[in-house]
Amino acid sequence: MPKKHQLSKDRLVWMFTQMVRIREFEEAVKRAFIEHPGVIRGHAHLGDGAEASIVGSLSTRNKTDLAMPSYRCHGYPIVLGTPLRKMMAEVFGRKDGLCKGFGGSMHLADPAHHFPGTSGIIGQSIAHATGAALTAQVKKTGQVVYCFFGDGASKQGAFFESVNMAAVWKLPIVYVLENNQYQAYTHFSLEDANAVAGDPLSKKAAAFSIPGVTVDGTDPVAVHKAVSKAADRARAGKGPSLVETKFYRLSAHGNVITVPPLPTQFPEHEAVAVYGNKKEFAQWKAKDPVVKFRSRLIKTRALTEANAKRIEDAARAEVKDAVEFALASPLPAPEEAVNYVYA
């Protein structure tokens, strides 16, 4: 790793801390469907398993750089500094939320922390982020845009059109393709070969004459190294890169409470509930990025067992406070439903 991208012990501990905060937030959202049924309206798509990809990528950004993911979006603003209270209140649809309760889990936005917003439409974040990169280029802000999307989104027309434009105009953007093995309930290996265009998916970069690389998405240091190189290229005016991070989504595709229950809402991961593949789930669970990184830092003496526990306890307390704050926050009044609606 180039010297300027070397990670200090403090930075490694910071990365672990952010990964733990993301995990605790996602676990609290998951529990809310059981402990507080009806509080979360609609879907909540969790990112447990993606912590190393999220933190490894965003550990390379400058303070004003933008992060623009898709609907599986809780982890990114946590790293950017968005208050967990306001995030949880938004997930719960409350007035004290980031978007006053109108956005919910899939539509978080916090421009003050360089998080312009997300979309529930697959692939839409790619077009939005590319537009933001064009704005940064035209206005000469020096910003790099970090665009996150799933393997399924790489089939959308928005992907091909946006990446082509970014490559032609050398826009300051890093495309992070987060391959979590599942598109809803369909495993990556079961998809039509013509649809996925080969493995690794980073091969798609060749069509646009830009760099493409695939890295271990359970290793935040490996992700940091790859994304650092891509961000440096973007900052130097050389245009976009495609970084595929491979990991495993540890929760079901989406959590939702419906009455009556729909047969597609599985309490377990798709590998178990749909395909009965307990072995696959167990193999990936053993590579849990948070657990793995914790062990690595303790082994290399960047972190002690006691400090790790303090970080975990602090994250749990922070998330518990966020849940209590969200539950105490009022719901928007019915007459406010048409607020912010424009013709």
Image: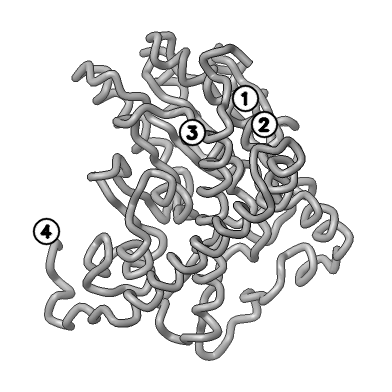
Question: Disc 4, disc 2: CB below 8 Å?
Answer: no
Residue 50 drawn at (x, y percent) = 60, 48
Quarter location, residue 101 = bottom left
Mark identifier at residue 59: 3
On the image, the x and y values in percent for residue 21 come to 51, 56
- In the figure, 36 relative to 129: above or below? below
Q: CA distance from mark 4 to mark 3?
A: 37 Å
Residue 57, image x, y percentages: 52, 34
Mark 2 and mark 1: Cα distance apart in space = 6 Å
Q: Residue at x 33, y 31 (%)?
A: 63
Residue wearing tag 2? 201
Near-viewer residue (238 or 154):
238
Q: Residues within 10 Å of mark 4 (few under 14, many from 20)?
A: few
Residue lying furthest right in this view?
279
| Upstream in sequence: badge 4 or badge 1 | 1
Name the residue at 58% across, 48% down. Answer: 51
Q: Could one spot residue 157 in this view of the protein?
A: yes
Given contact means CB atoms under 8 Å apart, are the residues at marks 2 and 3 in contact? no
Identity of the amino acid at label 1?
A: Lys
Q: CA distance from mark 4 to mark 2?
A: 39 Å
